[in-house]
């Protein structure tokens, strides 16, 4: 029996809510990726080229530190990785998280929230951080996507 983990980073709470519904819909464990240095609203101001998020996203090698870990990653076969879309891709803290794990033999499935942007170059940007794993194509969801929609999606990509 396959065991799944829904790991997510949420800057404003939108992705957190969606991740919770996904975990409930597929009976998966839930893990919040918490930045060591929390993001402030000024950090998230994408209009300010000197904001923390703008600087991180301009540098593909940026790896923001994470305050917590998954102690039992070996228990999981499938990792759903959730995040808000930033600059048409995953925030670099997602790369940090993936690179801290032994993903050998695991399936990694991205999911995202966004006001309007699609997944863009997400899989391309995450591929190098998923060594040894099968990286599936991800999907962007509306913030209010329900459990039934999430379950149908999860069932369709196994």
Image (tube, rainbow, N blue to C red):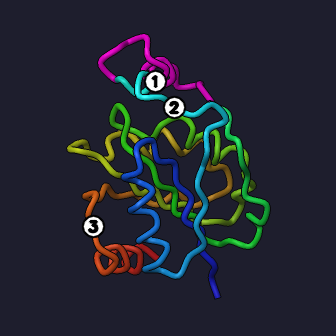
**Which residue occupies 32% across, 41% down?**
120
Dot 2 corresponds to which residue?
39
What x and y, as percent, mark residue 69?
73, 52
Residue 25, label in figure: none
In the foreground, 133 or 146: 146
Magenta span contains residue 61: yes
- Residue identified by numbered label 1: 43
Q: Is residue 46 left or right of residue 64?
A: left
Q: Are marks 1 and 2 in contact (CB under 8 Å)?
A: yes
Q: Secondary structure at mark 1?
A: loop
Q: Foreground: 53 or 59?
A: 53
Image coords of residue 100 (percent x, y): 73, 46
* Image position, residue 144 (x, y; %): 26, 63
Circle 3 SS class: loop
What segment is highlighted magenta in the picture?
46-64
10 Å neighbourhood of mark 1: few (<14), some, or many (≥20)?
A: some
The CA span between labels 2 and 3 is 25 Å
Identify the main secondary structure in magenta.
Answer: loop
Q: Earlier along the polypeptide chain: callout 2 or callout 3?
A: 2
**Distance of label 3 from label 1 (alpha carbons):** 27 Å
Tag nearer the camera, 3 or 1: 1
């Amino acid at each position: 029996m396959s065991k799944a983990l829904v790991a997510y980073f949420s800057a404003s709470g939108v992705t957190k809510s969606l991740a919770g519904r996904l975990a409930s819909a597929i009976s998966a464990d839930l893990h919040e990726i918490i930045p060591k240095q929390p993001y402030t609203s000024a950090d998230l101001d994408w209009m300010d080229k000197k904001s923390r998020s703008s600087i991180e996203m301009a540098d593909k090698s940026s790896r923001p530190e994470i305050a917590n870990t998954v102690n039992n990653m070996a228990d999981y076969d499938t990792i759903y990785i959730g995040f808000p879309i930033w600059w048409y891709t995953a925030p670099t803290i997602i790369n940090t998280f993936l690179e801290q794990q032994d993903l050998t033999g695991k399936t990694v499935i991205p999911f995202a929230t966004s006001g309007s942007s699609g997944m863009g170059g997400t899989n391309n940007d995450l591929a190098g951080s998923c060594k040894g794993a099968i990286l599936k194509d991800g999907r962007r969801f509306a913030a209010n996507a329900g459990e039934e929609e999430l379950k149908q999606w999860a069932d369709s990509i196994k």
